[in-house]
Amino acid sequence: MNKARFGFFFILLILLTFEMVVQTEGRKHCREKSRLFEELCFNSEDCANTCRYEGFHLGGKCWGLFRTCYCKKKCR
């Protein structure tokens, strides 16, 4: 039971901590957690507006298990 629990939390940790890379029309975009959007994210439009205010001109989207606002940026 402990091994199964450890495996579950290990996979969950990996999924929650890596930077998501998204393919959009042949271009790669990365996501970065918004610094200003602090509440649960259920409206991607509000998230995108907050991201634009932060300087992420590609907008943003609600994503993840904990409904977090992630801003889109060009990958390096």
Image (cartoon, grey):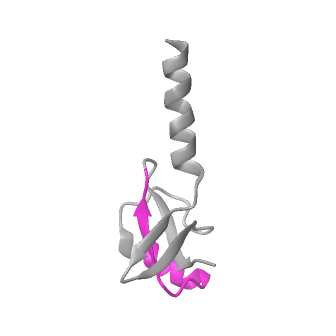
**Residue 62 x %, y %:** 41, 63
Viewer-nearest residue: 11 or 42 = 11
Viewer-nearest residue: 67 or 11 = 11
Q: Residue at x 60, y 80 (%)?
A: 54
Q: How many marks?
A: 0
* Residue range highlighted in magenta: 47-64
Considering the image in quadrants, where does the C terminus appear?
Answer: bottom right
Q: Residue at x 42, y 47 (%)?
A: 65
**Residue 5 x %, y %:** 51, 21
Viewer-nearest residue: 53 or 63 = 63
The relative height of residue 34 versus residue 52 in the rendered view (above or below) is above
Horizontally, is 44 left or right of 38 in the view?
A: left
Viewer-nearest residue: 33 or 45 = 33
**Residue 72 x %, y %:** 50, 76
Q: Residue at x 57, y 68 (%)?
A: 34
- Whether residue 8 appears in magenta in the rendering, the answer is no
The relative height of residue 53 versus residue 2 in the rendered view (above or below) is below
**Direction front: furthest residue:** 26
Choose top left, top right, bottom left or bottom right for residue 44. bottom left
The relative height of residue 74 versus residue 33 in the rendered view (above or below) is below
The relative height of residue 32 versus residue 4 in the rendered view (above or below) is below
**Residue 61 x %, y %:** 42, 69
- Whether residue 58 appears in magenta in the rendering, the answer is yes
